Image (spheres, grey):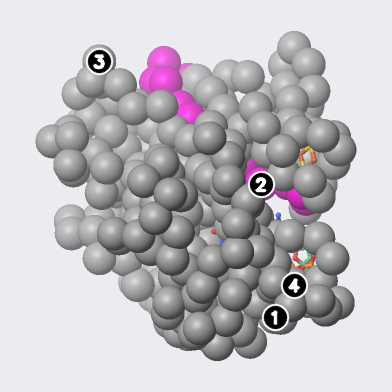
Amino acid sequence: MMLEQKATITSHQKIAPRVFLMAFASPQMAAQASPGQFVHLKPSAPGPLLLRRPFSINRVEGKNIFIMYRVVGRGTSLISSLPKGTEIDVLGPLGNGFEISRKYQEHVLLAGGMGLAPMQFLAGRLKAMKLESRFFYGCSCKKELLPCPTPGKVIATDDGSCGHKGFVTDAFLSRIDKFKKPVVYACGPWPMLRRTALICRQHHIDCQVSLEAFMACGVGACQGCVVKGVKEYVTVCRQGPVFDSREIDWEQESGL
Ligand SMILES: Cc1cc2nc3c(=O)[nH]c(=O)nc-3n(C[C@H](O)[C@H](O)[C@H](O)COP(=O)(O)OP(=O)(O)OC[C@H]3O[C@@H](n4cnc5c(N)ncnc54)[C@H](O)[C@@H]3O)c2cc1C
Ligand code: FES
């Protein structure tokens, strides 16, 4: 059940250049949240930010919900200035989240850049369910690597300054024959998701992608976040953000 409430920031720190990790207390949301879902938030105090901003749930610890975000514009810059103890206005948990099924033998996670944000929660849930998982994380260079505690992950950097040289999708493709009855979960920029979807289609692998879009209401009312599906337009906030990669029309340009 979606909740709208004021929550107190319990920790807020910079973890990399322009990247912050924030926790806020919400026992009810924490109890309900599942990997791949997101929260929509803005400062409680009246100010310049009228619309909420969407952020994936990075993990849940006790009553705390964590988000990990990059400062890219006015909203994230304002949110990054809020100290511990401040109240924020939160709507969540929103969206559908990843579907986890025991019918697969290996659960393969692909994260590109800030697409790492929801994957820690997913990796933790898979581990708690004692499911076999593989983690691939890619970014442009070593300097952009974000803290990711998951052991045994494969790192890829575009310039080769750390781990596999090339895109995270190449690192995944180079190991694809080793996976037994896999499913893929991917989050990252549109071109990475498109490439992942194509690889999975060619290898007959089920694939779930977490999409991003500009959002206003966050609950399916404004049609602001629609993307083209193969059959019909879909709302990322309500029908997603996680989709079966076969449902999306990958020929369209991302609006972001
Ligand atoms: C379901 C969902 C989950 C998300 N989870 C995270 C997360 O965990 N961590 C994180 O850092 N970001 C996440 N985002 C993106 C985040 O919401 C945007 O970066 C943020 O709303 C930008 O707000 P702003 O006011 O700072 O930027 P604006 O001033 O609105 O825009 C500044 C720049 O950011 C780009 N931008 C705006 N919105 C998005 C977007 N939705 N995705 C990508 N680029 C955008 C614009 O193209 C523009 O170049 C998520 C988005 C969605 C839809
Ligand atoms: S943001 Fe309003 S319908 Fe998705």
Foreground residue among 137 and 221: 221
Is residue 134 part of the magenta span, yes or no?
no
Image location (x, y in percent) of residue 147: 35, 72
- Measured Cα–Cα span from mark 3 to mark 4: 41 Å
Task: Identify the amino acid type marked 3.
Answer: Lys
Label number found at residue 75: 4
Which mark is drawn over residue 103?
A: 3
Asked if disc 4 is less than 8 Å from ligand 1, the answer is: yes
Cβ at disc 2 under 8 Å from ligand 1 = yes
Give above or below for 205 relative to 55.
above
Residue 139 seen: no
Give the label, 4 or 2, closer to the camera: 4
Taking the image as shown, residue 100 lies to the left or right of residue 33, namely: left
* Image-quarter location of ligand 1: bottom right
Q: CA distance from mark 3 to mark 1?
A: 42 Å
Which of the two discs, 3 and 4, labels the residue nearer the N terminus?
4
Mark 4 residue type: Gly
Q: Which residues are magenta?
A: 202-215
Q: Is residue 74 visible?
A: yes
Observer-side mark, 1 or 2, equals: 1
In terms of sequence position, does the residue under pointer 3 or pointer 1 come before the other? 1
Instruction: Tell me whether the residue at label 1 lies in contact with that at label 4, contact meaning CB atoms closer than 8 angstroms.
Output: yes
Mark 2 surroundings: few (<14), some (14-19) or many (≥20) residues within 10 A: many
- Is the CB atom of the residue marked by disc 1 within 8 angstroms of ligand 1's nearest atom? yes
Q: CA distance from mark 1 to mark 2?
A: 19 Å
| Residue position marked by numbered label 2 in the rendering | 212
Q: CA distance from mark 1 to mark 4?
A: 5 Å
Label 1 Cα crowd, 10 Å radius (few <14 / some 14-19 / many 20+): few
Task: List the residue tagged with mark 1.
Answer: 77
Q: Position of residue 225 (x, y in %)?
A: 78, 40
Alpha-carbon span between mark 4 and mark 2: 16 Å
